[in-house]
């Protein structure tokens, strides 16, 4: 069963790339006392993720903040080194935090896992966006199949 509006996020530890190398960060650190726009992509460096999804959130940081968002986070079932390289490639610095869900545990715990084995990509995360308020899901927008509509920064802004 998939997470839904009103549910508390499951506890998880992600890896992020810091100036000193890989560093763990927990859901408590990320979401406690904050209103966070969290979005998930099936994979770093994939076409839609790199050309539209991440750039949309990066470009709309100020707009999201103006609507009460304290932070932006992106998660993907990739390792921390891939996420670090993707952040550099996309010119991401302090606009958002990129969260490596290396084993896909968070995606699975949310019930938003994607089986991309048919494409040689293994288990991934579905594409979605959500607003998390103090660890509780306030909004959730999960894409159908290969769509890119309801998980975009533009769509999320319209809902705030």
Image (tube, helix red, strand yellow):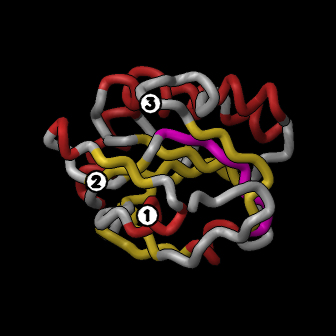
Residue tagged 2: 123
Q: Quick check: can you spot residue 59?
A: yes
Q: Is residue 94 left or right of residue 61?
A: left
Q: How many marks?
A: 3
Q: Earlier in the sequence, mark 1 or mark 2?
A: 1
Q: Is residue 134 magenta?
A: yes
Q: Earlier in the sequence, mark 1 or mark 3?
A: 1
Q: Quadrant of the C terminus?
A: top right
Q: Position of residue 69 (x, y in %)?
A: 77, 47
* Residue drawn at point x = 41 percent, y = 54 percent: 113
**Magenta span of residues:** 127-135
Question: 117 or 20, which lies in front?
Answer: 117
How far apart are labels 1 and 2 at the CA level?
9 Å
* Residue drawn at point x = 78 percent, y = 41 percent: 65
Q: Position of residue 71 (x, y in %)?
A: 68, 52
- Residue farthest to the front? 1
Q: Is residue 94 magenta?
A: no
Residue tagged 1: 108
* Residue drawn at point x = 49 percent, y = 46 percent: 40
Q: Quadrant of the N terminus?
A: bottom right
Q: Position of residue 83 (x, y in %)?
A: 32, 50
Residue tagged 3: 145
Asked whether disc 1 touches disc 2, contact meaning CB atoms under 8 Å apart, the reply is: yes
Q: Position of residue 138 (x, y in %)?
A: 79, 53
What secondary structure characterizes most of the magenta part? Answer: strand
């Amino acid at each position: 069963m998939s997470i839904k509006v009103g549910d508390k996020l499951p506890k998880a530890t992600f890896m992020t790339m810091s100036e000193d190398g890989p560093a763990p960060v927990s859901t408590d650190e990320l979401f406690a006392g904050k209103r966070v726009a969290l979005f998930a992509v099936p994979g770093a460096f994939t076409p839609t993720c790199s050309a539209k999804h991440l750039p949309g959130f990066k470009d709309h940081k100020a707009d999201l903040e103006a609507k009460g968002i304290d932070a932006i986070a992106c998660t993907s079932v990739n390792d921390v080194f891939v996420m670090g390289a993707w952040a550099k490639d996309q010119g991401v610095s302090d606009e958002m935090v990129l969260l490596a869900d290396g084993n896909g545990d968070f995606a699975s715990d949310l019930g938003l896992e994607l089986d991309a084995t048919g494409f040689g990509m293994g288990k991934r995360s579905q594409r979605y966006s959500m607003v998390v308020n103090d660890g509780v899901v306030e909004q959730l927008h999960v894409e159908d199949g290969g769509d890119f509509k309801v998980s975009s920064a533009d769509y999320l802004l319209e809902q705030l």
